[in-house]
Image (cartoon, rainbow, N blue to C red):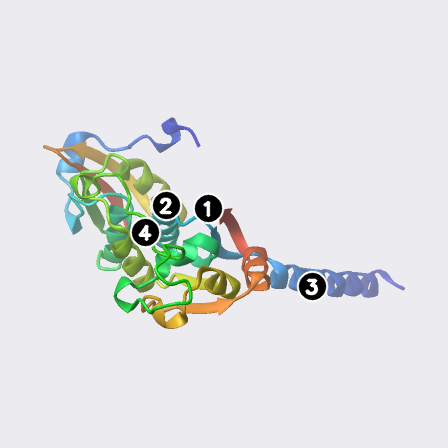
Amino acid sequence: MTDSALAETMTDSELKALKIGKIVDARGTACPGPMLEAKRAIGECPVGGVMEVQSSDDGTIVDIQRWCRKMGHEYLGNLANDGFWSVYLQRKA
Amino acid sequence: MNDSAHDDELIKTLVKRLEALEREAPRNQLALGVMSGDPEHTMAAFMVALGATTFDMEVEMFFMFSATATLRDQKKRVKNDLGDSTFGMRPPMIKYDLKKHGAMSLEELIREAGEAGVRITVCNLSMDLMGIKRGELIDYPHLNFAGVAAFVDMCSQSKQCWFM
């Protein structure tokens, strides 16, 4: 799998305009923290809804991209904030 | 044998072979053999285990030799035949600044693993070699004791097997 296959599909303004179904604040925790929290939280996001994972760990972006591919969700993109990333995905299953 | 009967026979054979394959197919499971008690190795093992649980994989860990000491509860230390020797003691703590980077300690990783259903099997011989009694181990929810056959079996049943 090349990085281009994982490229985000939404623009920054599209991501900012998303209605968020579930926010996961995993800032300040490092691997595997953000993924554990994402897995715990996905059940609370409505199917078809958007989950936003906030993480200060740079590795989370690619982790979430791969996790979406395996678990059947759709990776939407990421935004750089002040000191943390917001990673967006749509719950499909 | 006419065509229809031949097809039926073929289908029966294929179904039998398919059922045999399904029985033998590796599960969506990760098997981890953990031998080194160096905290860098055991931390990595638990991190990989937890990562696998986020992919809905089952995880089986097999602890042997010096890694067994990692499961020791310092508060439950029982005087053993080895006296004051440090043999079988918990290895020194990791040298990295975990707190600064928000990384979990080994204790926290082990607790999370227990909550996530990671199963730990401890090599019974290793317990004896290291002079560790069962009563000295931490209260881990999915713990059992076995020998090498258990490890070989869990590996043969798993999609992925790693030795750390």
Counting from the top left corner in percent of width and height, residue B120 is at 42, 62
Query: Which of B10/A4 is in front?
Result: A4
Q: CA distance from mark 4 to mark 2?
A: 31 Å
Is any part of residue A48 visible from this angle? no
Q: Amino acid at mark 1?
A: Met
For marks 3 and 4, give the CA distance. 33 Å
- Residue projecting furthest to the bottom: B135
Task: Measuring from the top left, give residue B57's x and y in whole percent.
Answer: 42, 56
Q: Nearer the viewer, residue B123 or B50?
A: B123
Q: Earlier in the sequence, mark 3 or mark 1?
A: 3
**Quick check: B24 above or below A52?**
below
Q: Element under label 1?
A: loop
Q: Which mark is residue B164?
A: 1
**In contact (CB < 8 Å): disc 3 and disc 1:** no
Quadrant of the snapshot with the N terminus of chain B: bottom right
Are the residues flagged by discs 3 and 4 from a single subunit? Answer: no
Name which quarter of the figure residue B136 lies in.
bottom left
Task: Return the disc, 2 or 3, that comes first in the chain's sequence.
Answer: 3
**Closer to the observer: label 4 or label 2?**
2
Q: Hey, what amino acid is under mark 4?
A: Lys
Gap between marks 2 and 1 measured at Cα: 8 Å
Instruction: Name which residue lies at 39% across and 31% down.
Output: A5
